[in-house]
Amino acid sequence: MTFNDNARIDTSKVQRRKGGRTAMIGGGSLVGVLILFIASQLLGVNLMPLADMPSTQTSSSEQTLDLSHCTSGAAANEDDNCRMAGAADSLDVYWNATLGDGYRIPGVILYTGSTSSACGTASTAVGPFYCPRDESIYVDTDFFQSLRSDFGATAGPLAQMYVLAHEWGHHISNLTGTLGQVGNDSGASSGSVRLELQADCYAGAWVKDASQVKDANGNTFMKPVTREEIADALNAAAAVGDDHIQQQAGQSVNPDGFTHGTSEQRQRWFQRGYESGPGACDTFSVSAASL
């Protein structure tokens, strides 16, 4: 989606970090390494498996970068970091109005290299994720290039914002208590798949109303979404479907290993949210055949 040039972006809702190498204290098990490898292939990864990782220490070379150049919609149209800041502002306003009492804004940390989180190390190997322990979203902006080169997605502006909106959806599931009821199971109708499809649906719900969300000055953040932009977001959703990822890895499609849903499911639930809003996103009440 395109921001209106005169939209005012509140950059205080986002941190931008640039980190160096992260030292592992106590080493890591083979299982932990495998978990990281799998997580690196997925979008919106459930970070609960990382809760048992060894403690980490971020390099002292980490810097907090200035986002003062990102305060306008025009800047958000030109720069990935500014686009994320603008999307975060819009998502916060939208979900605050939608959820009402009980809503809390998540932390949003954009980084390159690596940084620390309450769920373990955030790095390019892990990919974007939501950490329920500190209620924060971590996005390595280099992931958008990975979407293009490794997953074959177009990764245009709305596809990039879909990544953030999906992780914000996990925050909403956390606030409503749904996330805490889901374990680390896998399978075509598992709680993990239902949770991820719900986040896709919540992302679509925000896109539906994004052009109506207003900044602090009463200006709308974004212009109406186009068909081409929706197609771009759907392309990104398909690229990170479990079946597509397994095929990309040269494997047979194995539904027992699903944790995020198929490409078709991810597209369909995004579309469902876009067409019907967040009230249509109860993925836990539908049968396995309807997922």
Image (cartoon, rainbow, N blue to C red):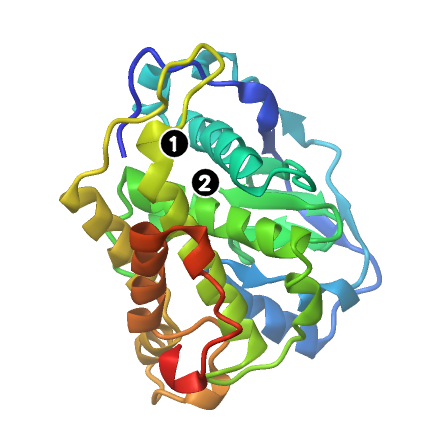
The tag earlier along the polypeptide, 2 or 1, is: 1
State the CA–CA distance, disc 2 to disc 1. Answer: 7 Å
Label 2 crowd bin: few (<14), some (14–19), many (20+), radius 10 Å: some
Q: Which residue is more in the foreground, 55 or 166?
A: 166
Label 1 crowd bin: few (<14), some (14–19), many (20+), radius 10 Å: some
Element assignment for label 1: helix
* Three-letter amino acid code of the residue under disc 2: Thr
Q: Which residue is more in the foreground, 31 or 83?
A: 83
In the displayed structure, does residue 214 sit left or right of residue 50?
A: left
Please report the residue visible at 46 percent of the width from the left and 77 percent of the height from the top: 286
The residue labelled by disc 2 is 141
**What's the mark number on residue 121?**
none
From the top left corner, tell me how far across and down residue 15 is, in percent: 61, 29
From the top left corner, tell me how far across and down residue 41 is, in percent: 45, 66
The residue labelled by disc 1 is 80
Q: Quadrant of residue 12?
A: top right
